[in-house]
Amino acid sequence: DAMVIQNPRYQVTQFGKPVTLSCSQTLNHNVMYWYQQKSSQAPKLLFHYYDKDFNNEADTPDNFQSRRPNTSFCFLDIRSPGLGDAAMYLCATWGGQGARNYGYTFGSGTRLTVV
Amino acid sequence: GQNIDQPTEMTATEGAIVQINCTYQTSGFNGLFWYQQHAGEAPTFLSYNVLDGLEEKGRFSSFLSRSKGYSYLLLKELQMKDSASYLCAVYNDYKLSFGAGTTVTVRA
């Protein structure tokens, strides 16, 4: 059973039209992350939540926002998608000290296409 | 800053052994992970090293030298299904920083 669920698996959006990607988890992990991964590149951390504390990476564009209304859900909002924002977006959770043995739990990812 | 380097591509024959090297220079270090990623899918956990030395898990082994900022992933008895990208990632302060990945192609 999937423990970190991302919807949708594939998303097509129009240039400049706001889009929201969603992530939910059944693990009750307190840390959630959003990564952007472009083809043949390393996953790039956009931001993470430690409980309700939001942590933005210094180089994350203002165009990207996030919300975490409760422990289970986290959203990635792209306010005005550009062609350069087409990528795989990965949501992940971290379960605390015990997670050192297995690292993040990843969702299946959402592949975003901008047309 | 974070700098994590690994080769872009490697090719090997089914049944052979392949070693993927990773060197890192990071502002902090609390462990190193290796992940496997098939095309279009999310990364899956392979191994974790926090102390120097070799960790063995079936056909996969991972080695770490903290003083040298160096790790490798060893894949033995290669199978066609091992064709994938392998990501090296350094853990620090609740965050993983990833290398760009090494694409391994296994040929019959």
Image: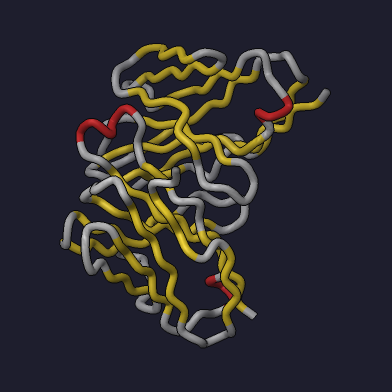
Left or right: A76, with A71 as reference point: right
Q: Image check: B63 left or right of A41?
A: left
In the displayed structure, A108 sits above or below B60; it is below
Indicate whether B68 appears above or below B7: above
Location of residue B40 in the rendering, given as x and y in whole percent from the top left corner: 62, 51
Q: Position of residue A104 (x, y in %)?
A: 36, 41
Residue B90 placed where, x, y %? 36, 37
| Residue B106 relative to residue B72: left or right | right
Task: Relative to A11, say whether A95 is above or below.
Answer: above
Decide which of B69, B59 is in the foreground and name it: B59
The quarter of the displayed image where residue A68 is located: bottom left
What residue do we see at 31% from left, 38% from top?
A: B91
Q: Nearer the viewer, residue A48 or A11?
A: A11
Side (left or right) of B91 relative to A51 = right
Residue drawn at (48%, 64%), measured in percent from left and top? Answer: A7
* Residue occupying image coordinates x 62% and y 14%: B76
Percent x, y for residue B62?
46, 19
Asked which quadrant contains residue B12, the reply is: top right
Instruction: Using the image, determine if residue B73 lies above or below residue A108.
Output: above
B104 or B69, which lies in front? B104
Nearest the viewer among B28 and B32 is: B32
Please give the name of the residue rendered at 63% of the width and 39% of the height, measured from the top-left corner: B8
| Residue found at the far right of this picture | B108
Residue at the limit of the structure toward the bottom, as seen here: A16
- Point out the image quarter for the C terminus of chain B: top right
